[in-house]
């Protein structure tokens, strides 16, 4: 159903952010841990990102680079403060513990056992800070026979069952094109952090450990995969652009591209068939529900494809919009950048980097009416905030200078 109201006006600038007062120490790198830190920071948390001196987070150098830094970095690290700290040195570990002692949340995505080797096990950190919410993201989790194996998002996607379902039947499994396994783990981690903070605040609970495994985050969104196997012995296979067991829902050819059409609702299906000139199919008794349509899905896809192939993408979209049938084209980055709906909902924002150039970045999701997320600061250079954060932690200028001379900080 089409919305009959617009988003409410942003709250006054004096309204506190939803997570104002929450301090996060982020010790992760690349994608999973930092995406969680990014999300918390967008809603007001003070995110202190600890990075290795000299090199920093490898994401700074991933994909396309401008002024020596990845433009991806400008999204992933906005609203964060960078502290360049060598965690391999004892003095660096001491400083990290000092920062964690005053934090509400610790986010890390190192291999299991890394923090323990630095004297920062959950037991040691909770003795220091009983209220600490500790998010640990790893390939296989903190327990189990695979815990010590190296794991990246792509491996989690494979073990979680996603890769087996992507691509065309009988061909090589393909990836989604973005690091979806890492991002799913980050979102599950964010849910865990917010849940634990709520429990601590409302129920009088203490801090706790949130254990997120990459493959489990993927597995959690695999819908009916396991119940169907458990009940019927069915191993779901790749199905290209179709959605198995739900019909019709597929990508259909046009004269100048492809259109995705979801005509799987009972009343929607009838409107779709009327639109493509096949009211006979819309009125067929055995096609009145999804089960009947699944049995004849190839026939339905062929009928829809024959109609769409005679028309341009926009003609198809216009006809289906008039009939209230869900449909959409396959967007490229250019399509997104030029789309008025994205701009109307502030999903494309202009951000000035600390190097002085302006870049468009994705907006903030989800959209809260009273305490919306904001971009308060651009992504930091490595160590931009080392002195300020350490001074807040009680270190003198002389102590900071000594640590810098030893290479503990940058």
Image (cartoon, rainbow, N blue to C red):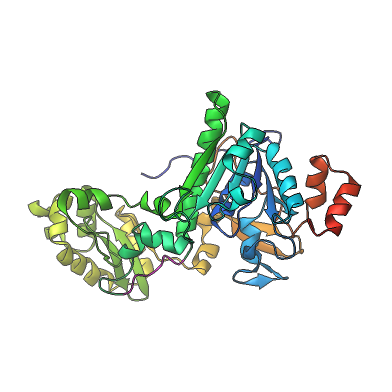
Q: Position of residue 409 (x, y in %)?
A: 79, 56
Instruction: Tell me what residue is drawn at x 58 percent, y 60 percent.
Output: 30
Would residue 6 be found to the left or right of residue 172 on screen?
A: right
Q: Position of residue 317 (x, y in %)?
A: 35, 62
Q: Position of residue 57 (x, y in %)?
A: 65, 61
Instruction: Tell me what residue is drawn at x 86 percent, y 58 percent.
Output: 405
Instruction: Tell me what residue is drawn at x 48 percent, y 68 percent.
Output: 332
| Residues shaded magenta | 172-177
Would residue 94 be found to the left or right of residue 155 on screen?
A: right
Q: Is residue 240 above or below residue 3?
A: below
The secondary structure that most of the magenta stretch takes on is loop
Q: Is residue 176 magenta?
A: yes
Q: How many marks?
A: 0
The quadrant of the picture occupied by the N terminus is top left
Instruction: Tell me what residue is drawn at x 42 percent, y 42 percent.
Output: 3
- Residue reaching furthest right? 398
The quadrant of the picture occupied by the C terminus is bottom right
- Which of the 4 image quarters holds residue 13? top right
Would residue 178 be found to the left or right of residue 2 on screen?
A: right
């Amino acid at each position: 159903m089409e919305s009959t109201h617009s988003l409410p006006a942003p709250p006054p600038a004096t309204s506190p952010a939803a997570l104002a007062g929450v301090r996060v120490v982020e010790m992760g790198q690349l994608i999973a841990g930092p995406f969680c830190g990014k999300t918390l920071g967008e809603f007001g948390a003070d995110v202190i990102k600890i990075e290795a001196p000299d090199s920093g987070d490898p994401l700074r150098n991933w994909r396309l680079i401008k002024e020596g830094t990845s433009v991806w970095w400008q999204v992933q690290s906005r609203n964060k403060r960078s502290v360049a700290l060598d965690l391999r040195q004892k003095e660096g570990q001491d400083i990290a513990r000092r920062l964690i002692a005053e934090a509400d949340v610790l986010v890390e995505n190192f291999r299991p056992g890394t923090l323990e080797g630095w004297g920062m096990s959950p037991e040691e950190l909770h003795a220091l800070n009983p209220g600490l919410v500790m998010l640990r993201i790893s390939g296989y989790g903190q327990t189990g026979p695979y815990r010590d194996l190296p794991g990246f998002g792509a491996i989690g996607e494979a073990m979680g069952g996603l890769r087996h379902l992507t691509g065309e039947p009988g061909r090589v499994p393909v990836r989604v094109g973005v690091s979806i396994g890492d991002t799913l783990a980050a979102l599950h981690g964010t849910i865990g952090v917010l849940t634990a903070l709520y429990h601590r605040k409302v129920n009088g609970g203490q801090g706790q450990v949130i254990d997120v495994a990459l493959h489990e985050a993927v597995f959690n969104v695999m819908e009916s995969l396991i119940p169907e196997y458990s009940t019927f012995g069915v191993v779901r296979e790749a199905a290209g652009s179709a959605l198995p067991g739900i019909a019709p829902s597929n990508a259909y050819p046009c004269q100048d591209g492809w259109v995705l059409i979801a005509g799987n609702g009972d009343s929607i299906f009838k409107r779709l068939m009327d639109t493509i000139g096949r009211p006979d199919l819309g009125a067929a008794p055995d096609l009145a529900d999804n089960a009947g349509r699944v049995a004849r899905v190839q026939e339905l896809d062929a009928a829809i494809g024959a109609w769409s192939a005679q028309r341009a993408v926009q003609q198809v979209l216009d006809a289906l919009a008039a009939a209230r049938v869900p449909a959409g084209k396959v967007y490229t980055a250019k399509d997104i950048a030029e789309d008025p709906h994205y701009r109307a909902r502030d999903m494309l924002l202009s951000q000035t980097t600390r190097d002085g150039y302006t870049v468009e970045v994705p907006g903030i999701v989800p959209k809260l009416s009273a305490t919306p997320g904001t971009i308060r600061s651009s992504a930091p250079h490595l160590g931009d905030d080392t002195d300020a954060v350490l001074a807040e932690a009680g270190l003198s200028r002389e102590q900071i200078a000594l640590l810098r001379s030893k290479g503990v900080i940058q």
